[in-house]
Image: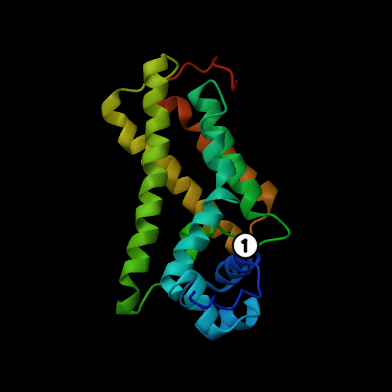
Amino acid sequence: MAARGRPRTFDPDTALRTALDLFWERGYEGTSLNDLAQAMGIASASIYACFGSKQELFRKVMALYGMTSGARPRSALHEHPTTRAAIHAMLRATADEITRPDAPHYCMLILASPTGAVENHEVREFLAELRRDMFSTVKDRLARGVTDGDLLAPPADLDAIARYYTTVVQGLSVQARDGATRPELEAVITCAMAAWNTLTSTPSRQPDG
């Protein structure tokens, strides 16, 4: 019978959460494998054995982020009966998440991306694809509104509207990182929603759900 490998002396779920916190605080390029090993309390070899390379670990971290902090804005798009209410709730949930007192004040998907080294191209593209998915999710919700009849925007305009509100989401993150408070972000959201009728031709009497 083959000898069994040594049992792990750490909890992978706890270690992954620690890695998430470190990547969130420092970004991808600002976090070294040694930093991760020290924060996670395990050897670099154990990181490779359990999670793979730094890039593979980061992908697992982003999946965890998507299921935790990133889940509320996405869920908001599906929890409201009208499209306007869904977009409004998405923006407000985003502002709530990026101003939490127990986490860095920005969206990891937007601002944890590496910027320079050629070898990090795959990570940049990975995050860009996740951001493109965010845009597609918003556009799909707008298209659902057209199908449901509560959104009067021409289908040809959905791309621009989705890109506008995705840009607002990204801008909220930059503002929060630079010190904007939750009330200040709410003022931005109010301005963004004031453009709704012009962008969509939705009657102003429509409720928020």
**Residue ID at (60%, 58%):** 176
- In this view of the protein, which residue sits in the foreground, 73 or 59? 59
Q: State the residue lying farthest toward the left.
A: 156
- In this view of the protein, which residue sits in the foreground, 122 or 56? 56
User: Where, by quadrant of the figure, is residue 41 drawn?
Assistant: bottom right
Residue 114, x across and y down, in percent: 41, 71
User: Where, by quadrant of the figure, is residue 39 drawn?
Assistant: bottom right
Q: Can the viewer see residue 188?
A: no
Residue 130, x across and y down, in percent: 40, 53
Q: Can the viewer see residue 140?
A: yes
Residue 125, x across and y down, in percent: 32, 62
Q: Which residue is mark 1?
A: 13
**Residue ID at (60%, 51%):** 69
Label 1's element?
helix
Quadrant including the C terminus: top right
The amino acid on which the numbered mark 1 sits, given as a three-letter code, is Asp
Q: Is residue 133 above or below residue 15?
A: above
